[in-house]
Image: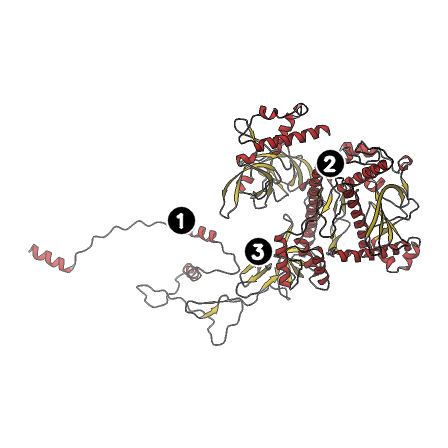
Amino acid sequence: MQNQAVSATLKSTLLAALSEEMAPVSKDWLKALCNEQQQSQFSTSLAELLDEGAIVTTRIGAYTLPERLGLVTGTIIGHRDGFGFLKTTQEGTDLFLPAKEMRKVFHNDFVLAAPSSMDKRGRREGQVIRVLKPGKLELVGRFFVEGNHRYVVPDDSRINQDILIGKNDTAGARQGQVVVIEVISRPSAPKLAVGKVTDILGEKMAPGMEVQVALRNHDIPHEWPKAVTKAVSKLEEEVDEASKQNRVDLRDLPLVTIDGEDARDFDDAVFCEAKKSGGWRLWVAIADVSYYVRPDAALDKEALNRGNSVYFPDQVIPMLPEQLSNGLCSLNPKVDRLCMVAEMTISAAGRLSGYKFYEAVMHSHARFTYNKVAAILDGDEALAQRYSEQVPHLQELHRLYSALKVSRAQRGGIELETQETRFIFNAQRKIEQIVPLTRNDAHKMIEECMIQANVAAAKFVEKHQQAILYRVHDRPGKERLTNFRGFLNELGLPLGGGEEPQPSDYFKLVEAIQERPDLELIQTMLLRSMMQAVYQPDNLGHFGLALKSYAHFTSPIRRYPDLLLHRVIKFLVNKLEAEAAGKTVKNKWTVTGGFSYQDDEMDKFGEVCSMTERRADDATREVSDSLKCEYMQDHVGTVLPATIAAVTGFGFFARLDEFHIDGLVHINSLRGDYYHYDAARQVLVGEKTGKRFRIGDAVTVKVASVNMADRKMEFVIVNKDGQADEFDRPERRGKDGARGKRFAKPGEEREAGKRSDKKKPRHRDSKNKGKRRKPSSASDSTKQAESENKGGFSPWQQRDPAANKAKSNNEASAKTRKKPKKKRKQRPGKQERNAAKQQKN
């Protein structure tokens, strides 16, 4: 730890010195800045700065900052179409990378690049100088063999390069199998990357394959290191008596756990009782994970590496080994467990009025599910008789929830009821059914209790000025707010607050839309207008919950920030007790796992935990999309009711009402008109008909196709009969000013008195003036039809100028050139001939 602190200080000194110098400096010049303690760390720190791209060397070996040479560092973001972007560390300097540059790198590589020219679309292009930190050296994809070549096509569409596989590096993989490869040599245009197969996962559509692919695509750790396995092997199955000493004994307090039906780890237990003076006393007991997972131990390093548990449908990748997550750190019923307790007092108005934290030992008196508690509260006599001892406590807990709900509404805390779904699998782990999930009062009751514990923990640590990770949810940005207001204006809905709306303004909006049929879609748009919540040591409050201080305390089994907060609270409790006894605390740790961190340490933890959270969200979304596509393969051609969920410049996404699955209706599939995207109103408008497609509109769609590779599906709009939606097409004005049909529908009846047959075209030449010439052969007839259709354009086909140009070039090249005729000598006129004869005579 001391060496890390010295290295961090030295790096800051070197960077500060280089930023002040007006020219590159030598290595000796930099080393002269070090004191005696830093001399031993100089070479290591300098190498780390070079690897990070924080400093660069010139051709003569001098050192400077990359921006002084016009260079930038950043992370590669690949695109499925071959090009990419460089997300730079300097704000406002992102670069576009054409396909030729992307052939040098992989998605998520951290590189040094040089800005270059502007492209035709006004984007600043970049040139990759070198890769500073490879994004990933292990990829997953499908194995193929063509002739003497073996290669793997990465499953991640952001990597648009095939990986060559050596003849002896296939590990026995067969055609089309999903494999894991290790990259041996990276790409360097024009050479492709080379790798070797390290593992064969199986066939593409094998049960559970989508999870295995997502784990590797998103670099989610899923195997335990040997050091972790060794550490957990020493743990007992039950809590030993020595560990229970010097703790508050809550084993007689009727604490219970309330979780979902399929939950296997129980990290929180609750109990409340009414106070004689009014209000309630609430106990929230959380599993004491910090007692078993100590700072810098093997378990701690792997927990930070994972950051959080990842919950896939029917499978969990836990942050902690099962011996802890489902064993010693799970508050299972009828067994003793170590816990951290937040004991709080709540006023009759539902406001937090007091709190204290302490280490305890508890004994869960029952394991409830949300549905059981909801049934008991609704008056289920059989369940009430079975749990007669706990029923009065549950009813008191519900009364507390009612007060907390009123308090939340008064402060403007936003509560959204978004529709979630659950996959029901059969014995072969194929989706049998997709069912909606509903939240009952039991869900909300526990949620409010956890919020109060999180608020109390944040206030406690903030009061004593200790560094922690707050759960920060910033207010919406201007651009998002403007887009959201534009959407609301189309629906005739107001949002108060002007340029800086408060949570209460959003709360009023949510209250106003509860009875609308498009409630779910408006809530979805509201969520999109919000900023993403992150972990950071700077407390900016939680906008969505309308709270000034908020931190995660209640789930240390599955979230690393909660584990950090437990350690800090333990340290503070120990410090306050020592100071009350007149003792001085010298150590920054406690014997039960407490620890005191610095702000710069929390900065790094915040970045890692925010990243792992996004990584888990991306992976679960990928698996969910894969499973939905697999399920919808059996529904191709099916006509279903849907609702427009999002509108873009290339079409709109429709959400199936029955399955809650989104599919794209491409703008090219909309018949009968040309459509334009109105970004301000988020609507597609027909050029001539004025027909509109906007969020919330009910449509009938047919499942046109399912793309398993891209995990996407396409729909087409149909009418009630399941036929393509063909309304009247727009008319156009002819050259003579008359109006006529631009297109004719197949089988369309014409107006009475008008001829249905077209006049045949006249072909005029010097020999057949004014007469119609019949085609002499089939080839002539074909040429005549082509001539009639020359320059025409079908609305069912997309315009392709490049194809037309290529066609004309091919036709021109196919024509044989004729030899130029020799000019015939002009014959003299009659007068000239007569004059010549007279002269001759």
Residue type at tag 1: Ser
Q: Amino acid at mark 3?
A: Gly
Mark 3 vs mark 2, foreground winner is 2
Residue 663 place in picture, x, y as percent: 64, 55
Q: Which residue is mark 1?
A: 813
Cα gap from disc 3 to disc 1, whole angstroms: 39 Å
The circle drawn on residue 649 is: 3
CA gap, disc 2 to disc 1? Answer: 75 Å
Residue 346 in view here: yes
- Considering only order in the chain, which callout, 1 or 2, is on the residue closer to the N terminus? 2
Q: Which mark is residue 598?
A: 2
Going from N to C along the chain, the mark reached first, 3 or 2, is 2
Is 792 displayed left or right of 671 in the figure?
Answer: left
Amino acid carrying label 2: it is Gln
Q: Could you tell me how far apart the alpha carbons at marks 3 and 2 are, in whole angstroms?
A: 47 Å
- The quadrant of the picture occupied by the N terminus is top right
210 or 622: nearer the viewer: 622
On the image, the x and y values in percent for residue 276 come to 91, 54
Residue 317, image x, y percentages: 75, 42
Q: Nearer the viewer, mark 2 or mark 1?
A: 2
